[in-house]
């Protein structure tokens, strides 16, 4: 994939928000690339992610399957020979713990979801075939799946078109719609309810001339521009993580990016 911060390219994949799920749309040619790589579970990428304790067994994608991932993570919504395939990735819901008598994150599933997205986005990042697409690539997602500090890190490259949309927002504008979605995402995965929230709520803040910052519960956990040097609105930039230590934080931030992506695509 080209560096979309500097050079526009036809869209290979899109992000979207589903019902308690992340949606990933994939160009048909790019999806054939995914099939050609991830149908081989012995490749180092899959073996490395499979070695993470608790991650479910890898199910290879194929033309015959409507689900795949580390466990049944991706579910096919639509697919056609000449059209984009749309995949739904359900968020890992908190489960009731008899030991603690309350809802707690389902960590094995959360890591399995992160590992599945890791495999997908890594595979798409090395797809460099020229394709025809009616729209441009808006984001490039790169994420990490591991346990411990910074184990849920992710970075997101924003295209020039994405940054031009950010530049239309007034200074210190908060995207309440996306903040509510992120709060609901975090609550779903952790079991924390509104009346029980002792953490700082999620925040999506736009600042002039072209910046956006996303944050979620944690120790100053969020995504921020790599630097604040003013660039041309024709250029993009990347958001980098700070203290993103868990897949729950990672997925909360990624759902925020998906919500913004939906808005840019629909403008």
Image (cartoon, helix red, strand yellow):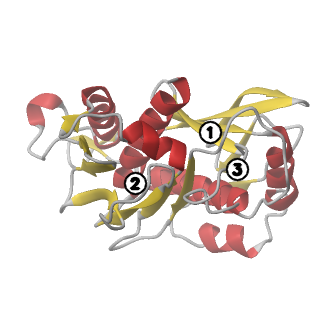
Which mark is first along the chain, 2 or 1?
1
Between 132 and 177, the one lying in front of the other is 132
Q: How crowded is mark 3: few (under 14 residues within 10 Å), some or many (20 or more)?
A: some
Quick check: can you spot residue 208? Answer: yes
Q: Mark 2 points at which residue?
A: 250
Q: Where is residue 221 in the image (x, y as percent from the top left)?
A: 25, 59
Residue shown at 54% from the left, 58% from the top: 5
Residue shown at 25% from the left, 50% from the top: 215
Which image quadrant for residue 41?
Answer: bottom right
Q: In which quarter of the image is the N terminus?
A: bottom right
Between 42 and 87, the one lying in front of the other is 87
Residue shown at 26% from the left, 35% from the top: 183
Which mark is first along the chain, 3 or 2?
3
Q: How crowded is mark 1: few (under 14 residues within 10 Å), some or many (20 or more)?
A: many
Q: Is mark 3 on a helix, strand or loop?
A: loop
Quick check: can you spot residue 93? Answer: no
Q: In this image, 192 relative to 81: left or right?
A: left
Residue shown at 40% from the left, 54% from the top: 250
Which mark is first along the chain, 3 or 1?
3
Q: Where is residue 46 in the image (x, y as percent from the top left)?
A: 70, 67
Q: Up-down: is 42 above or below 102?
A: below
Q: Up-down: is 19 above or below 258?
A: above
Q: Name the residue under label 1.
A: 14
| Disc number placed over residue 9 in the picture, else none | 3
Q: Where is residue 155 in the image (x, y as percent from the top left)?
A: 46, 61
Q: Estimate the spatial distance between the alpha carbons at disc 1 and disc 2, rounded to whole Å.
A: 18 Å
Between 35 and 134, the one lying in front of the other is 134
């Amino acid at each position: 994939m080209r560096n979309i911060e500097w050079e526009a390219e036809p869209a290979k994949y899109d992000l979207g928000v589903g019902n308690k799920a992340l949606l990933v749309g994939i160009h048909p040619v790019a999806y054939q690339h995914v099939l050609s790589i991830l149908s081989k579970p012995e490749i180092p990428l899959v073996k490395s992610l499979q070695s993470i304790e608790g991650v479910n067994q890898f199910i290879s994608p194929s033309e015959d399957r409507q689900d795949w991932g580390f466990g049944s993570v991706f579910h096919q919504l639509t697919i056609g020979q000449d059209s984009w395939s749309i995949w739904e990735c359900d968020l890992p819901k908190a489960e009731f713990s008899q030991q603690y008598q309350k809802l707690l994150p389902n960590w094995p599933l959360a890591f399995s979801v992160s590992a599945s997205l890791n495999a997908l986005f890594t595979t798409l990042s090395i797809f460099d075939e020229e394709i025809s697409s009616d729209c441009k690539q808006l984001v490039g997602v790169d994420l990490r799946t591991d346990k411990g500090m910074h184990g849920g890190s992710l970075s997101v490259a924003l295209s020039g078109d994405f940054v031009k949309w950010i530049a239309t927002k007034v200074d210190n504008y908060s995207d309440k719609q996306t903040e509510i979605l992120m709060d609901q995402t975090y609550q779903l995965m952790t079991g924390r309810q509104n009346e029980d929230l002792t953490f700082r709520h999620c925040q999506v803040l736009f600042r002039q001339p072209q910046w956006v910052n996303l944050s979620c519960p944690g120790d100053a956990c969020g995504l921020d521009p790599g630097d604040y040097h003013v660039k041309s609105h024709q250029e993009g930039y990347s958001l980098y993580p700070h203290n993103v230590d868990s897949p729950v934080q990672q997925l909360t931030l990624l759902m925020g990016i998906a919500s913004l992506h939906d808005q840019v695509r629909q403008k």
